[in-house]
Amino acid sequence: MKKSVAAGTALVAVAVLSAGSAQASEKISLRLGGYSKWWVVGAWESDSYQGATQTDENSVDVKGDNEIYFQGSTTLDNGLQIGIDIQLEGGGHSVSNSRAANAGADMIDESYVWLAGGFGKLELGSKNNGAYQLHVTAPDAAGNWNEEGLMADALAIPTHISGISPLQHGWDTTAILTDNDSEGVTYFTPSLYGLTLAATYKPSSSEDNRGTVNLSTGATAGAVTGEFYALGGLYAETFGDVGVKLSAGWASYDFNVPSSTSADSGDDHVFEYSLGGQLSYAGFTFGSSYRRVLADRGNLQATADLDLNAQAWDLGLQYAFDRYAVSMAYYRSEASGSDATESRDVIEFYLLSGKYALGPGVDLLASIGHANYTSEDHQLAEENDGWTVMSGLSLTF
């Protein structure tokens, strides 16, 4: 750890010192950017789930997702580029059950500075790890897939599955998202023949130093602890009319797993890896990705009652033409959960989406999806399934 911190500090120092003689460059001026998405959502879910949770869900709702970016950069006389990026949550949908404990009142989503030059790019601050940033997933025309999508974040069809595995950290995604915008340093190599590599170090994977991240509302809650390391790679190249994207990611950290007996409590060392790929030709894009969570249970007794191992994958096809795009995608995750049962928590999504560009930065969106949540212990209050129809407007600026 000391070596990695020293190396990162040295790189920052070299970049800053090399910029010392550059006094004629312009001062950084911030500019506004961001996006605003608003959806009208129709949802029809299981009567048994509503009965078990004693709820009477509305069949129509309005959900939004908004962020404002404050960005700026300058190029020094020696060619070194320096920039800043601060992202402000702009309101919209309420958080889902799975991410409520972590999202809270965190109004600044990401905040970091970056340095770029012939050496590559260095990011320092609050941002997702490099493996996440380079990850490739199944396509979705409406942007309603993976992190913070209305389907993936259980905002259209809700669930009360108390996720224990880091894969159920709050977003059902194949990207390694366990660190979730916590503070750290990420280095990206220059792209060479379409290949870009990334390395991330974070002293703590708890976002904004608010202590450990609680991943469950139950008595057997777990938490990510200690240092977080990640490596990632992306190969993106075009061969004639064929586009190819391939990604791979890896992460390492400790995860505290309390048990029903104090003798069983301890830290699991967890490894995650992800794979993804897209192939595009003549307006068609086919993509798929995979994520695996592997826990080393050497620090726990054989009677420990939680198992962190989990996996997820997706598959999708998109066709874009003129101002239109349509896509179909499927996602499935499986988490082991308790050792007391051989079943698994299973989450499945089916999604048909479309987009029409009304103008620059203005898109009309639509999605039809089905969600199915199966609890390993088959508790009616945790299992749900249903259909959703959504139509929305997306503005980027």
Image: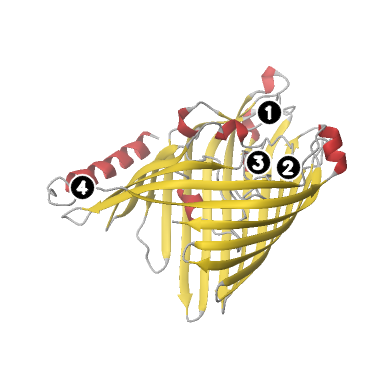
Task: Single out the mark in the foreground, 2 or 3.
Answer: 2
Residue that appears at 58% across and 49% down = 147
Q: Residues within 10 Å of mark 4 (few under 14, many from 20)?
A: few
Q: Which residue is mark 1?
A: 217
Query: Which numbered disc, 2 or 3, marks the residue that appears first in the sequence?
Result: 2
Nearer mark to the viewer, of 3 and 1? 1
Indicate which label's residue lies in the foreground, 2 or 1. Answer: 2
Q: Given the current orientation, which residue lies at the most extreme bottom position?
A: 240
Identify whether 52 is placed above or below 27. Answer: above
**Residue identified by numbered label 4:** 27
Q: Work out which quarter of the rendered image holds the N terminus and state it.
A: top left
Amino acid of disc 4: Lys
User: Residue 113, percent across and down?
Assistant: 33, 44
Q: Tell me the residue that label 2 is attached to.
A: 158
Q: Nearer the viewer, residue 201 or 103?
A: 103
Q: Earlier in the sequence, mark 3 or mark 1?
A: 3
Residue at image location 59% in from the left, 72% down from the top: 324
* Disc 1 crowd, CA 10 A, few/some/many (<14, 14-19, 20+): some
> From mark 1 to mark 4, how far is it between C-alphas?
47 Å
Image-quadrant location for residue 389: bottom right
